[in-house]
Amino acid sequence: MSRGAMQHVELDESEVPVPSPEPPARRRAAWPWVVGTVVVVVAVLAGTQVVLDARERAAAERLDATPGVVRSIGADVGVLWRPDPAATAVIVQRIDVDGAVLGLAVGDDGSQAFVSLDQRTGRQRFSTPLLGPDPVRARSLDRTAAGTCVAVPVDEGPPDQAACLVSDGFVQYGDEGVETRKPATTTRVVVLDTRDGHVVADTPAPGATALAALRGLAVVTVPGQDAQTEVVARDLLTGEIRWRFSPPRPGADRRVFAGEVRLFAVDGLVAVTVPGWTATVLSSSGEVLRESRPGDADHLLDPVAGRLVLLSTTGSGTLLSTLVERGRADVDVPGEVLPFTVDDGSVPDLVLTSSGDVRGWDAATGEARWRSDVVASVNALLLDGRVYVSTRGGVAALDGRTGDLLWRASTVASTVPGFLVTDGRQLVTTEQPVGGGNISNLAAVALDDGRSLWRVSFPDDLWSSAAVGHLLIGWGRDGRLVVLG
């Protein structure tokens, strides 16, 4: 048979197996790979959310701890508790630790104690007796203590100690002014733990009438003969005298308001003021950093920024603010400083002045940063790079870096805003009626755009409100004071 010859062949297809095509190996592994990828993505997203949540919580905690930021406020705001005169005296001492306010309180029997009051309920957490009953003080119309308590400064966080000036002397006030002055027979500086109230140190401070605290020091004023008062710095724990300073005598030709020397301490500096003289500024070692001189001048403390502001008038009659800070040269800025009642540090070294308009300055150099035609009426806050200002007609928000107006929010007709407060999530102010009205509103606006969030009649027929530490305080025309929340 030749190679090229063709032959007939028959195929039985039914007997020839046809295998099914197998899926490629990659396709068999696809579902496990997809599932694994989804698990990884979900895990990453969950981890990211945990981190974001943690950051949010940390930011909220930092904001809640920022001085001047009050507890959460809502449209259901009401009276939490009503301080009596002794509790009111504790609140104004402004020692704020772990949800409590602390300070020196005078009991119904005239005794004195260092007390801690829960901010939400007013319930007493602890009370440390400091001076026994005094029936004469108990009969006094003024239940405030002759002494006071101040927080001992710390590097950061809430103070863990308070220093109290405890005295059995006091002034009894009547309807027509001072009626009786009971001279002190015992005066001490008592240092206490703010967490449980136990006494850390108790040292005599003979004749002391005023107290300021620095790190490791209790600085007191001691009146002497012929209206001469001495400033004495004592070791906080041992009472040992570290230094003395004699301020100038009030001049006979100058205004003398009871001839009292006053002390103010902020960030390691002490200001000593005498009526009719400018303030003397001392370092923690007693060195005179700025001498006083005859002349009517004023000053203010900016505890949020940690500075002292000296106010004076130039030869042309222009008001001048001198910023005095530890470790910096004095800085002069025109106008009167408008201190922030809340400052989260988002625009470093920004200081405001208010004199017909609002101006922003560099606190380190005194250089002008910006100017706005907004007219501030009460106070200002700095949050997240924005300056919020209470004005005559409402609230204004400015860019903290440029001064540009971001938004305005007006109060209702025939009202003016009061003190501006924030809980970190909204701005709240009192809308006070103009022209003899008796009912105020409490109103909240959004931080981002000023839109109205809620407005309610002021609880308990109160008139106005303000922040004291982390407390939202309301008061009436009759002087009633309550804690709101």
Image (tube, rainbow, N blue to C red):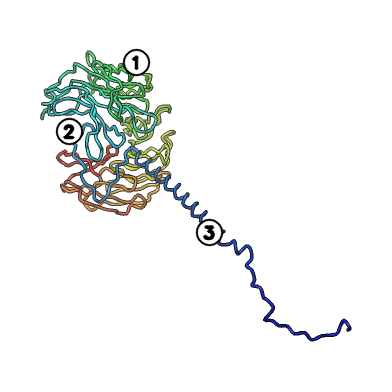
Q: Amino acid at mark 2?
A: Pro
Locate residue 52 relative to residue 189 in the image: left or right: right
Q: For marks 1 and 2, give the CA distance.
A: 36 Å
Mark toward the viewer: 3 or 1: 3
Q: For marks 3 and 2, give the CA distance.
A: 68 Å
Q: Which mark is residue 232?
A: none
Q: Position of residue 308 (x, y in %)?
A: 35, 30
At mark 2, the secondary structure is helix
Q: Amino acid at mark 3?
A: Val
Q: For marks 3 and 1, give the CA distance.
A: 75 Å
Contact? badges 1 and 2 (CB < 8 Å): no
Q: Position of residue 154 (x, y in %)?
A: 37, 28
Q: Position of residue 345 (x, y in %)?
A: 40, 39
Given residues 337 and 468, the one toward you in this image is 468
At mark 3, the secondary structure is helix
Q: Earlier in the sequence, mark 3 or mark 2?
A: 3
Given residues 5 and 348, the one toward you in this image is 5
Q: Quadrant of the N terminus?
A: bottom right
Q: Are there few (<14), some (14-19), or many (20+) residues within 10 Å of tag 3?
A: few
- Which residue is identified by label 1? 243
Mark toward the viewer: 3 or 2: 3
- Which residue is identified by label 2? 85
Q: Amino acid at mark 1?
A: Trp
- Which residue is identified by label 3? 35
Q: Are there few (<14), some (14-19), or many (20+) residues within 10 Å of tag 1?
A: some
Contact? badges 3 and 1 (CB < 8 Å): no
Q: Earlier in the sequence, mark 3 or mark 1?
A: 3
> With respect to residue 380, does 149 lie above or below?
above
Locate residue 21 relative to residue 143 in the image: left or right: right
Q: Are there few (<14), some (14-19), or many (20+) residues within 10 Å of tag 2?
A: some
